[in-house]
Image: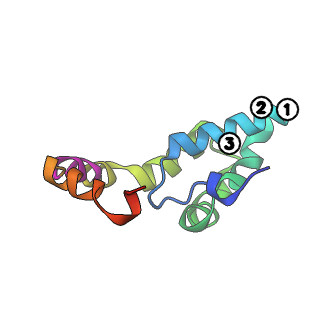
Amino acid sequence: MYTEDNKYSGEDDNFDFKFTIFYDLCSRADVPQEAKVKAYPTMLRGLALDHYYTNLKNVTMTLSFNQICDATRHYFEGPEYRRGILGQWNSITLRSVMSKARTPANQP
């Protein structure tokens, strides 16, 4: 039911998108709101799972579910991440888009 592709790794992932998948799967499985904090690590993999066990596991009793989610999101997608994404967007040109469209992988 929960594949590795659906989990958040913190690398080239979007936390909000992966969180939407997690929330949808919890709803389908009738996971109560108060149990989601315990289920939270199941949506993580790789660096994000390492970050959880290193920094957040021991504070799950003092932080709310939303605070734990925000801590993960901010750690991986904070200001530095946003500057990097903005830089990628700003470097896109018509020529670069056209050259990607002509690569053999993109041709039928």
Q: Is mark 3 on a helix, strand or loop?
A: helix
Residue 86 is situated, as x and y percent measured from the top left of the image, at: 23, 47
Q: Residue 30 carries which label?
A: 1
The reply to whether discs 1 and 3 touch (Cβ–Cβ < 8 Å) is no
Q: Give the range drawn in magenta.
A: 85-91
Depth check: give the residue in front, 45 or 33.
Answer: 45
Given the image, on which type of amino acid does mark 3 rest?
Phe
Q: Which residue is identified by label 3? A: 22
Identity of the amino acid at label 1? Asp
Specify the label residue 100 is tagged with: none
- Could you tell me which secondary element the residue under label 2 belongs to? helix
Q: Which of marks 2 and 3 is nearer the N terminus?
A: 3
Tell me the quadrant of the picture where the C terminus can be found.
bottom left
* The stretch drawn in magenta includes residue 13: no
Q: Is mark 1 on a helix, strand or loop?
A: loop
| Residue at figure coordinates x 55%, y 60% from the top left | 9
Residue corresponding to mark 2: 27
Q: Where is residue 91 in the image (x, y as percent from the top left)?
A: 16, 53
Mark with earlier residue (1, 3): 3
Res. 64 in view: no
Residue 90 belongs to magenta span: yes
